[in-house]
Image: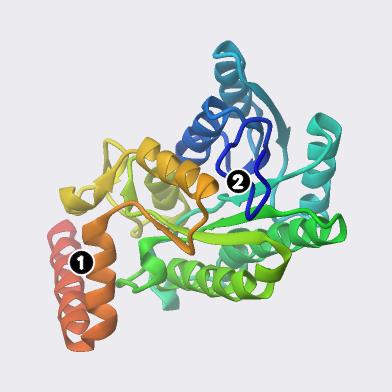
């Protein structure tokens, strides 16, 4: 591999760890990385989907392994890197992708729910990138650290404040680490998908509890604009492009990126969007009574 910066334009033989790798964006990225010649280890809390991804990759002539575990558990990040050592002899890149959604007003969330979403979406991701960066620096090797943020890392919506906060914080950490590690040849990127057709929203609906959460059809919320809906394969291809040519942020929707920029530049426009979304939610709640 060309190891000039990141893991280089040629990915063959590169070793990548992907958390949340059994379904959705993680699984699609694992397959795309394996197709590019990388050795892949996927992790998640359920063995069956992880085994399915590994079997798919192996059936296509790729190299893959898996580890079952909760990314938020104590010492899990170190255990994941040790699993990479055992499987492939080291780690060149990590994609901290594990996370889940919560659609619930802040006042309706419990302290336990708040801690859990931050532990999984933010703390675990930072810990994995931090430990990987320490290893790469100690070994004086370039590498690539990627964190899965969201379009909602740039703005939020009613009932998504907690989820958005985890993704905004992760985006800021990636930006800071990118500067801190530039002289080490270690690339750091944040990934900002728009609405992606996966089981993410089904999980969000379940986690949000009764009377909260999105109404989901075909893997996406019923109110999501079609222009903001994409497949996980779109994100996977963008991640592989970023691995080949590192960039600060990975966006998978031009209109999504443009909208986020408009909201940041023109707060009154953003406020109108927030109010319109709140009115929609109130109408839905009233019609359901």
Q: Is residue 116 above or below residue 84?
A: below
Question: x, y percentage for residue 86?
Answer: 86, 33
Residue that numbered label 2 is attached to: 8
Instruction: Report the front residue among 270 and 179.
Output: 179
Q: Residue at x 34, y 73 (%)?
A: 156
Q: Quadrant of the C terminus?
A: bottom left
Residue that numbered label 1 is attached to: 281
Tag 1: Cα neighbours inside 10 Å, few (<14), some, or many (≥20)? some
Question: x, y percentage for residue 168?
Answer: 47, 72
The quadrant in which residue 152 appears is bottom left
Instruction: Report the front residue among 53 and 177.
Output: 177
Question: x, y percentage for residue 29?
Answer: 50, 37
Q: Residue at x 27, y 74 (%)?
A: 261
Q: Locate residue 176 relative to residue 25 in the image: left or right.
A: right
Residue 260's label in the rendered image is none
Q: Quadrant of the N terminus?
A: top right
């Amino acid at each position: 591999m060309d190891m000039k910066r990141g893991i280089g334009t040629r990915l063959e033989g590169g070793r990548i760890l992907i958390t949340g790798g059994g379904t959705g964006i993680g699984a699609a990225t694992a397959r795309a990385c394996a197709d590019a010649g990388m050795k892949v280890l996927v992790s998640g809390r359920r063995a069956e989907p992880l085994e399915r991804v590994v079997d798919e990759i192996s059936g296509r002539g790729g190299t893959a392994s898996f580890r079952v575990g909760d990314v938020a558990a104590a010492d899990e990040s170190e255990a994941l890197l040790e699993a990479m050592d055992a499987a492939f002899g080291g780690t060149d890149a990590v994609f901290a992708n594990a996370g889940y959604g919560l659609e619930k007003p802040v006042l309706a969330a419990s302290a336990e729910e708040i801690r859990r979403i931050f532990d999984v979406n933010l703390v675990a991701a930072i810990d994995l990138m931090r430990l990987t960066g320490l290893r790469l620096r100690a070994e004086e090797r370039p590498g690539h650290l990627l964190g899965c943020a969201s379009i909602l890392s740039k703005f939020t919506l009613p009932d998504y404040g907690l989820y958005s906060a985890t993704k905004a914080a992760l985006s800021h950490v990636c930006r800071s680490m990118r500067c801190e590690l530039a002289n080490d040849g270690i690339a750091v990127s944040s990934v900002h998908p728009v609405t992606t057709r996966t089981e993410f929203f089904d999980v969000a609906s379940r986690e949000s509890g009764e009377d909260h959460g999105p109404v989901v059809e075909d893997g996406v919320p019923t109110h999501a604009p079609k222009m903001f809906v994409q497949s996980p394969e779109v994100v996977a291809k963008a991640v592989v492009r970023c691995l080949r040519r590192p960039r600060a942020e990975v966006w998978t929707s031009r209109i999504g990126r443009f909208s986020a920029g408009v909201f940041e530049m023109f707060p009154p426009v953003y406020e109108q969007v927030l109010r319109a979304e709140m009115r929609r939610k109130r109408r839905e709640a009233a019609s359901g009574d």
